[in-house]
Amino acid sequence: DPTIEPLIVKAFSGKLIIPSFKEFKKLVEEVFEDVRDCKDGKAADYIPQLARVDPDLWGLSVCTVDGQRFNLGDFEKIYTIQSTSKPFTYAMALDLYGSDYVQEYVSAEPSGEGFNEICLDDNNKPHNPMINAGAIVTSSLVKPELNLADRFEYMMNIFRKLSGGTYVGFNNSVYLSEKSVADRNFALGYYMKENDCFPKGSCLKTILEFYFQLCSIETKCSAHCIMAGTLANGGVCPITGEEVLDDVSVQHTLSLMLSCGMYDYSGQFAYKIGLPAKSGVSGSILVVIPNVMAICLYSPRLDKLGNSSRGLLFMEKLLKKVNLHQFDSDNNAAKIDP
Amino acid sequence: DPTIEPLIVKAFSGKLIIPSFKEFKKLVEEVFEDVRDCKDGKAADYIPQLARVDPDLWGLSVCTVDGQRFNLGDFEKIYTIQSTSKPFTYAMALDLYGSDYVQEYVSAEPSGEGFNEICLDDNNKPHNPMINAGAIVTSSLVKPELNLADRFEYMMNIFRKLSGGTYVGFNNSVYLSEKSVADRNFALGYYMKENDCFPKGSCLKTILEFYFQLCSIETKCSAHCIMAGTLANGGVCPITGEEVLDDVSVQHTLSLMLSCGMYDYSGQFAYKIGLPAKSGVSGSILVVIPNVMAICLYSPRLDKLGNSSRGLLFMEKLLKKVNLHQFDSDNNAAKIDP
Amino acid sequence: DPTIEPLIVKAFSGKLIIPSFKEFKKLVEEVFEDVRDCKDGKAADYIPQLARVDPDLWGLSVCTVDGQRFNLGDFEKIYTIQSTSKPFTYAMALDLYGSDYVQEYVSAEPSGEGFNEICLDDNNKPHNPMINAGAIVTSSLVKPELNLADRFEYMMNIFRKLSGGTYVGFNNSVYLSEKSVADRNFALGYYMKENDCFPKGSCLKTILEFYFQLCSIETKCSAHCIMAGTLANGGVCPITGEEVLDDVSVQHTLSLMLSCGMYDYSGQFAYKIGLPAKSGVSGSILVVIPNVMAICLYSPRLDKLGNSSRGLLFMEKLLKKVNLHQFDSDNNAAKIDP
Amino acid sequence: DPTIEPLIVKAFSGKLIIPSFKEFKKLVEEVFEDVRDCKDGKAADYIPQLARVDPDLWGLSVCTVDGQRFNLGDFEKIYTIQSTSKPFTYAMALDLYGSDYVQEYVSAEPSGEGFNEICLDDNNKPHNPMINAGAIVTSSLVKPELNLADRFEYMMNIFRKLSGGTYVGFNNSVYLSEKSVADRNFALGYYMKENDCFPKGSCLKTILEFYFQLCSIETKCSAHCIMAGTLANGGVCPITGEEVLDDVSVQHTLSLMLSCGMYDYSGQFAYKIGLPAKSGVSGSILVVIPNVMAICLYSPRLDKLGNSSRGLLFMEKLLKKVNLHQFDSDNNAAKIDP
């Protein structure tokens, strides 16, 4: 089991990040059950593959930076990662080409607009890589010299490493459906092509197919959470110890997850929860507590802004009990500090 | 000296937040001198009081949450706090009335617009309290039952406590000048009045006068820095130990300083520097490293977005040497961790 | 009676513009009665003086360029001219200072925005003089060297001449009410002051008071219609023969009434009715058939875009029977050509 | 010669629309020569076929509603009709399906935005048929049940009738080039497809190809002018007497040419010239004087807003001498009334 070694080393040396892990787990379980009867919102149904999913599914996984893990509920159910691919694609692009190059193509500002708005900033660049425009351009930057098969394989390999070798697959039905309802993204793509948003020589059709493929990667809560745990751990996979991403790439990615990761709720999420996160239309939310752990939530019903309703409720209730907000004061004795 | 006791207690108990304070200070001094020859930008000149200031002034103060302090350069020069009043006013409003009430009037989202734009969000509320619209509304919330003299006195008392009893004054010439060139803020004010942005019974003229007065409070680097240090310390003044603001009020305020504190550069600042901050048109920048310390920079030349050019350069150079970004990985051994 | 002479001259010389005036009148009477039971919409109630008006009032006046006139229904009821002052103020400004000067301050493009939107065009000028921003600036141009009393008297004299010496008054209650609910116009005013939209030395408060006074001029259908008839007649009052406005000023004014005179319905009105017109919040609509005649309609219930519902319905029904659209083909034999 | 008969009939009956046609022609010739040395602006060069055209070409044609014609300069040079196809396509759609049906898909308001802006009005419809969005949707309405070859043939037949059987052709090179640089129009198309702007069952690719083909129809000044003359004559071709379009369709089309036909200069053109017109990127401008005549101007250099510079200058100079503005007063004796 690739996860064991680093964890054991730390456990024996008495340096576990969350010493009271048992207590923390109990608390998470309580909140997990507490929000189970939240049936607010509606699962996405713009493609049949999403419409068919059982909306009551409810899974959760935790993975600390030193590899401690636990899973609850439907953590083995497979779903497509959708928009949660965006921060990883961005981190990979930063890793390959550096922040200066990537910022020539994608800015790093909240847009003040919807996630799929057809708009660019004052320099004719997408506002950030967490909205569709920015994610499509980011996709175009990664390994453009390879053919589409090799580009996709290249990314899959990194996703596999991010997840510590646990489950990462591809849902071709979702891919084909996404591609068939992609009017808005084609509009965005042609608009950006006209504004020279892509590297010279890019083929728009290929870029969009690549982008839809990245959205159609599938995984499950327990594996998805390890990917986020790798972000929490500065790019080093917490269960294999492999350095998958550079820590500077991860730092920049976390900054943008904090400001732009939860669609139009990003500002409120940063205000209330204060943690880098990214949600996807399948109903998953990745939450990163830097240098501590990651939490992955999966519940398909979405609120009006596109975030999992039960997932959000879980985070709000958890934060009332645990000291996780980035700006929680050390003076705050009322809460548990994990 | 009110600053001594808590610091001494901690120093003797061996629990100082920055054990290598001496090393950190040396590093700050180096960067301070390194950027001194940066003469980029232009001091504000829209009122004569600002236009007359020596643009070469360069001051810096540091204040840790356990009260360790040091000051460099022109740290005794008096200036008006201008927009750096905004986070404090917001924190005071939160303290008095709670986040739910305050959010009924002011949202917590980046606006994607200029700081003085005449626009409200979809609920007809200002986007956040760090832009003029939001700051004007926030001002209207604080102690509306008092007359203007008592309201101002109430605020001054808190500013004095935030600064640990060091210098806070009022510049009447600046106030009168600000009021005389306030077309945009009057436009904003009437627009918000029409949209019922203010509590019932508010008098717009009084609100704007109050707002201009808060901008015309004057202080100096060393005192200003203690105010920010109080934010770094969860609302407890680091040199007096007095709890001036509730830690939840401070947490919310820091969230918005991170996402919206540096005008249109806020996204880039969060990306590169990753710390809550607020700048003002006088040329000051407050930077908060939560639970660690605050830095106050003062240099009047502003870049095109309205932030002190030399102040920004200082932060960028400092961050290359010290591990301060909120999302710096603990794995990053190349930098000093203060 | 000042109206008699020119009409008699023309009548005797057999050169009346509408030879079948009797037939035309009969047709108008039919449509007038036909739409009487239209009770759509709601009278303005943002000030008590408007809220108190009987919403069932229904008046109509016609005035040909050779002075033939007739009146129906409540044509003697007094109401304030409100926004129908805008084209006249604009024509007066053109008359005094010429189109080049006036266009330095007010553009001549449809705005694509609401009538009271706080926005300027790319040159920081109001889009046109038929929206509030443009009308306020236009007001500021007229006789700025006079004191407010004399400026108002100057305008009143022209309004009196436009109406051929029939009734023009002033409603001080409406003026005081308008001034007291003018947040949006004050917001607009300060915004434009900041953008240097007014001639140097202008006092915003005076300009706005002047503007509200022009909106508070009162008249009645029969007199209001003669004012519009003067526009139909190239600036020459059809009942006195006095040249009140230059024909070039009138031509420019009619162009903007056609493109911008009916609030957000202007495009549809130009499309369906094809005639220069201007409506006001009291419920009046002035329609100009250049070189032929003017029609004034008065019915207080407004549709959602702010135009008199019954007035609009009347015009639509009339146009189905009479050949009045500017682009009606001479080949169209099915309609009467008045 | 198909043009002769109706003209002769009228000439013999002494009812010619412009009795002093000889005098008018002389005046036009003077202005035509007067503006010949205007070399302002730059010919379109976004496709090689346009870039290669001699920018000094200067042609003019006049066609009265009773078939009197004359031509000057390069009136025989062939060019593509480009955006001047828009009003004709719109008129054909109105003719086939009526204004109510067509307005379900395309509104009739100036947009306040650029001609190729990616935006729809509040009802998710293009603002008007004179901008690209509206013209693309209008194209989709015409004979959707036919295959592309038959649809195009259907349109060509009407264009031939509009021109009285004079020259109308197709430039396949321009078509292929237009299609290859069409990113913006594809962006627009996909955006509108997503917003259900097209009739059910429409194929976007086919619609856009059809639209580009309509833009690539070619003609020459003398023939182009007869098409516009048919609009001036209420839909009846002035040289054949054939009723090609219904007069109501023409009336609506002229309304929109007046308000929206000259790109972002439409407002100014309506203000100064006051006549329905449409310009195209090849450098042609069609001007319609309803019930009187049409003028076609051809000069490839365009100003910044996309209208032929020399063409505009010609119209301004002509209007100073002749009484053509729709709102010219009959009282204006200083000008010639043709």
Image (cartoon, coloured by chain):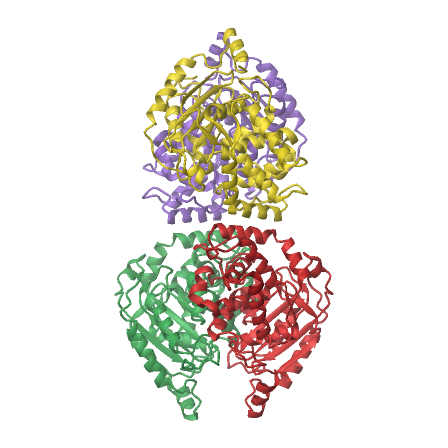
Chain colours: A red, B green, C purple, D yellow
In the image, is A49 to the left or to the right of D75? right
Up-down relation of residue C75 to residue C147 (above or below):
above
Res A214 → quadrant: bottom right
The answer to whether B23 is drawn above or below residue D329 in the figure is: below
Q: Front-most of C237 and A89?
A: A89
| Residue C228: percent from left, percent from top | 49, 26
Residue A228 locus on image (x, y percent): 58, 73
Q: Please identify the quadrant where the N terminus of chain A is shown.
A: bottom right
Is B312 situated left or right of C187 in this image?
A: left
Residue at (65, 31) in percent of width and height = D97
Image position of B149 (left or right of D226):
left
Query: C282 or B109, which is in the foreground?
Result: B109
**Residue displayed at 54% across by 71% down:** A274
Total marks shown come to 0
Residue A72 in the image: x percent, y percent? Answer: 69, 77
Image position of A274 with respect to A15: above or below: above
A222, above or below C9, in the image: below
Give residue C255's position: percent from left, percent from top. 46, 30
- Residue A177 image-quadrant placement: bottom right
Q: Does residue C41 appear anywhere in the picture?
A: no
* Viewer can see residue D11: yes
Q: Is residue D143 left or right of residue C144?
A: right
Query: Residue B166's quadrant in the figure?
Result: bottom left
Q: Nearer the viewer, residue A156 or C143?
A: A156
Instruction: For the C terminus of chain A, give its image quadrant.
Output: bottom right
